[in-house]
Amino acid sequence: MSDSYYDTAQICLNGHEINSMAASQPESNQNFCSQCGAKTIVACTSCNTRIRGYYHVSGVIGFFDYNRPAYCFHCGSAFPWTVASLEAASELVDDLDALSADEKQQLKDSFPDLVRETPKTPVAEGRFKRLTKKAGAEAVGGMRAILVDVVSEAVKKSIFGP
């Protein structure tokens, strides 16, 4: 039997990490985010399951990075920051004059497979690269700013480089 466990994370609705050890170190908790003023949560807004935070390993002292989740491990729902990022990216696509309406829709349709690792992720990466290249450097920069915190490390490297 292992004494390892996940702590609870506290994250604001916009995705700023407040405290990855909200249960074991509650003195660092905040009701509202000091970066953006948004309300903070410690549980999934769909199923009320606690958000997984720092992973404690018995007998090991470590300084491991915490990566906030995009989706609830219990019910699979997107967290509010994931939804907000996907909505913002879609709004940016609507403003890309260099793309046709069909290309805009193709780009929007690729977003869910960039955030989740699925068999369609490599296809979505290729489509994203092709269409954002056509849309221009400003589009790539805007997409990077919006999506960099919700896509996986592998996707990040593939579409934005090292």
Image (cartoon, grey):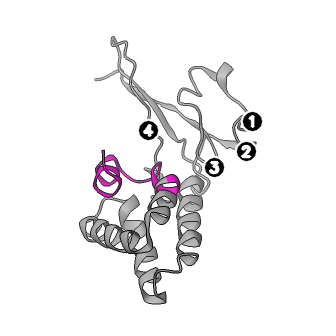
Task: Residue 65: say if magenta.
Answer: no
Label 3 is placed on what type of residue? Asn
Looking at marks 1 and 3 on the same chain, the residue that comes earlier in the sequence is marked by 3
Binning the other alpha carbons within 10 Å of mark 3 as few (below 14), some (14 to 19) or many (20 upward) gives many
| Helix, strand or loop: magenta stretch | helix
Residue annotated with mark 4: 67
Residue annotated with mark 3: 14
Q: State the mark number for residue 31.
A: 1
Disc 2 and disc 3 in contact, CB within 8 angstroms: no
Nearer to us in this view, 15 or 98: 98
Task: Residue 149: say if magenta.
Answer: yes
Looking at marks 2 and 3 on the same chain, the residue that comes earlier in the sequence is marked by 3
132 over 54 or under it: above or below: below
Which residue: 53% across, 66% down? 89
Label 1 is placed on what type of residue? Asn
Splitting the image into 4 quarters, where does residue 63 fall? top left
Looking at marks 4 and 1 on the same chain, the residue that comes earlier in the sequence is marked by 1
Residue annotated with mark 2: 39
Disc 1 and disc 2 in contact, CB within 8 angstroms: yes
